[in-house]
Image (spheres, helix red, strand yellow):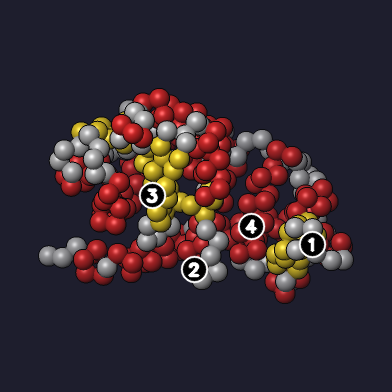
């Protein structure tokens, strides 16, 4: 019996996967709308009388400096959802934000005060998502089942489309590999590879995926990975399968899903989804000298990092 990958083809299957994830994260749209209304973003732009820079908007809304990066990510998605327009000013090289027909309908004189240093999930539950998972076996099992299901699809395309990543390697460590779904498939496809799964006892690792962690934490994780591998000349590399943000107008649903994921990370962890420039900065800070990037057929890319 043919697999789904053979029956539908990788491209069609990945597009379907992206659409499902987009629908699963659709609640993020309504929460972003709620934030826009409660902050009074449209009101401030309207009062300004013309398009406004992001720094001016942050000042008018009294966005705490600690939440500035989160606000920028919120605005990025609100622009994608067409609540606001984004205009590049060629002379000053500044980006301006203006009203659209949609934002004109959500104006409300209400400003939010202050901010929180912890991410929303921790504020709501008193602990981070990893601690909740550790203490809740049922939730842990559900999460692991979901991650294993995702890994099964990812690894099929990874091996088929990016198999060269693993050729010539003698050993592979899947950091935060969960129940080993991906490692087992790779080991089956490449018998010469010695595969090791590295994870916490309750199988939800703090080193699960880099998008769960802040830039500083990612640099520390990458530095530890760098210590564990040989140089590029000796065949050593770190292989990362992660989203690379690409705001592409020709693929609006895919780009929107990536931005929805980014807001999901912002709400539940200290992490985020990153652009190629942001990934490159992390690699440089961690002491790596070079990397290559190859997009998969869905939301993710394969990144090979060398030192």
Residue at the disc numbered 1? 91
Q: Earlier in the sequence, mark 2 or mark 3?
A: 2
Query: Does residue 28 appear left or right of residue 100 in this picture?
Result: left
Q: Earlier in the sequence, mark 1 or mark 2?
A: 1
Q: Position of residue 278 (x, y in %)?
A: 56, 45
Query: Does residue 47 appear left or right of residue 71 in this picture?
Result: right
Q: Earlier in the sequence, mark 4 or mark 3?
A: 4
> In the current view of this chain or complex, which residue is farthest to the front?
233
Residue at the disc numbered 3? 302
- Residue, x 46% and y 51% (percent of image)? 243
Say whether marks 1 and 2 touch (CB < 8 Å): no
Q: Earlier in the sequence, mark 2 or mark 4?
A: 4
Q: Secondary structure at mark 3?
A: strand
Q: Position of residue 60 (x, y in %)?
A: 83, 51
Quadrant (top left/top right/bottom left/bottom right) for the N terminus: bottom left
* Mark count: 4
Mark 4, Cα crowd under 10 Å, few <14 / some 14-19 / many 20+, is some
Where is residue 136, by image quadrant?
A: top left
Checking the image for residue 126, the label placed there is none
Residue at the disc numbered 4? 76
Q: Secondary structure at mark 4?
A: helix
Q: Secondary structure at mark 1?
A: loop
How far is the residue under mark 3 from the one under mark 1?
37 Å
- Residue, x 52% and y 58% (percent of image)? 246
Mark 3, Cα crowd under 10 Å, few <14 / some 14-19 / many 20+, is some
* Closer-to-camera residue (201/170): 170
């Amino acid at each position: 019996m043919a697999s789904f990958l053979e029956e539908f083809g990788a491209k069609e299957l990945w597009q379907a996967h992206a659409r499902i994830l987009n629908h699963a994260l659709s609640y993020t749209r309504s929460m972003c709308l709620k934030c826009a209304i409660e902050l009074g973003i449209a009101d401030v732009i309207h009062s300004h009388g013309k398009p406004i820079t992001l720094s001016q908007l942050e000042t008018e809304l009294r966005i705490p400096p600690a939440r500035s990066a989160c606000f920028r990510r919120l605005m990025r998605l609100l622009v994608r959802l067409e609540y606001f327009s984004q205009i590049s000013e060629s002379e000053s090289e500044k980006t301006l934000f203006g009203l659209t027909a949609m934002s004109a309908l959500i104006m409300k004189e209400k400003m939010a005060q202050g901010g929180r240093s912890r991410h929303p999930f921790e504020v709501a539950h008193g602990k981070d998502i990893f601690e909740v998972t550790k203490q809740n076996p049922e939730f842990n099992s559900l999460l692991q089942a979901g991650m294993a299901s995702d890994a099964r699809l990812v690894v099929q395309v990874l091996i088929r489309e990016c198999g060269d990543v693993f050729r010539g390697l003698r050993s592979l460590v899947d950091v935060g590999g969960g129940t080993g779904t991906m490692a087992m498939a790779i080991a089956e496809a490449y018998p010469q590879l010695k595969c090791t799964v590295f994870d916490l006892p309750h199988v939800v690792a703090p080193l699960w995926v880099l998008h769960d962690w802040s830039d500083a934490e990612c640099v520390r994780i990458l530095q530890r990975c760098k210590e564990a591998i040989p140089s590029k000349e000796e065949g050593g590399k770190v292989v990362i399968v992660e989203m690379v943000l690409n705001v592409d107008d020709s693929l609006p649903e895919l780009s929107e899903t990536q931005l929805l994921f980014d807001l999901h990370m912002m709400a539940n962890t200290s992490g985020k989804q990153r652009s190629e420039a942001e990934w490159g900065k992390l690699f440089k800070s961690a002491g790596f000298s070079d990397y290559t990037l190859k997009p998969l057929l869905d939301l993710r890319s394969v990144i090979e990092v060398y030192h």
